[in-house]
Every structure is written in structure tokens, then in C-alpha cells.
């Protein structure tokens, strides 16, 4: 089984951040990802675009982190924390950060 197939199986063919079912891609979590399964996240195009382009971040899209931040997967936890930290000024992300 390829790494992408393993990742899709782990993620149940859904974005590991928001749960979207379409336009899924592998996201290598920086800064030191070696591309292994433990250091990648399956993301949809919307999440990936907003992760890579802070000026395009839509706060309401990231309310999904209320659920995905509790994953046992470190790579997903890292991305969730980074996005919540970026959105801290919105108010509600601070409440979630306080729970982590």
C-alpha cells in the first residue's frame, strides 16, 4: 500500500481538519517533515490554501477545529494549534487553545 493510500485510509478519505470529502491532498507539516505518514496531514484544497496563505484565512471555516484538535495524531494537532493561534484574535479560538 502506498503512503497516500495509507493516509487516505487513516483519514477515512476525509480532510483531517474540516472533514471535506473532495479535492484532498497530502500536506507536509513544516518545518521538518520527512514526508512520512506521521508528519503529513490529508487536507482539502480550502484548508491547504488558507494554511499556506494567511491573508485568505476565513475564521468561520476553522470552527471545525473544535473537533479535529482532539485527534491523537501529532501532525493534525500541530496544524490545528497553528491555525487556532493564527486566529486567536477572533475570540473563540482562544477558548479552544485554553483547552489544549
Image: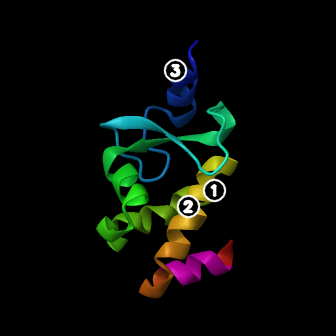
Dominant SS in magenta? helix
Q: Is residue 42 left or right of residue 56?
A: right
Residue 54 at least partly seen: yes
Q: Which residues are magenta?
A: 93-98
Disc 1 designates what residue? 77
Q: Residues within 10 Å of mark 1 (few under 14, many from 20)?
A: some
* Figure quadrant of the N terminus: top right
Query: Residue, x 52% and y 71% (percent of image)?
Result: 84
Disc 3 designates what residue? 5
In the image, residue 50 lies at what x, y percent? 36, 59
Quarter of image, res 2? top right
Q: How many marks?
A: 3
Query: Residue, x 30% and y 37% (percent of image)?
Result: 22
Quarter of image, res 15? top left
Query: Residue, x 56% and y 83% (percent of image)?
Result: 94
24, 51: nearer the viewer: 51
Q: Disc 3 or 2, which lies upstream in sequence?
A: 3
| Residue 67, placed above or below residue 24 | below
Distance (Cα) linking label 1 and label 3? 21 Å
Local secondary structure at mark 2: helix
Q: Residue furthest top?
A: 1
- The circle on residue 43 is none
Residue 72 at least partly seen: no
How is the structure coloured here? rainbow
Q: Is residue 65 left or right of residue 75?
A: left
In the image, residue 83 lies at what x, y percent? 50, 66
Q: Residues within 10 Å of mark 2 (few under 14, many from 20)?
A: many
Disc 2 designates what residue? 80
* Figure quadrant of the C terminus: bottom right
> CB under 8 Å between callouts 1 and 2?
yes
Distance (Cα) linking label 3 and label 2? 23 Å
| Residue 88, placed above or below residue 61 | below
Amino acid at each position: 500500500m502506498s503512503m497516500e493510500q495509507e493516509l487516505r485510509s487513516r483519514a477515512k478519505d476525509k480532510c483531517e481538519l474540516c472533514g471535506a470529502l473532495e479535492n484532498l491532498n497530502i500536506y507536509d507539516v513544516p518545518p521538518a517533515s520527512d514526508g512520512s505518514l506521521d508528519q503529513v496531514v490529508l487536507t482539502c484544497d480550502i484548508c491547504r490554501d488558507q494554511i499556506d496563505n494567511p491573508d485568505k484565512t476565513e475564521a468561520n471555516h476553522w470552527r471545525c477545529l473544535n473537533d479535529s484538535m482532539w485527534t491523537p495524531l501529532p501532525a493534525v494537532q500541530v496544524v490545528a494549534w497553528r491555525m487556532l493561534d493564527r486566529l486567536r484574535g477572533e475570540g473563540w479560538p482562544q477558548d479552544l487553545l485554553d483547552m489544549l
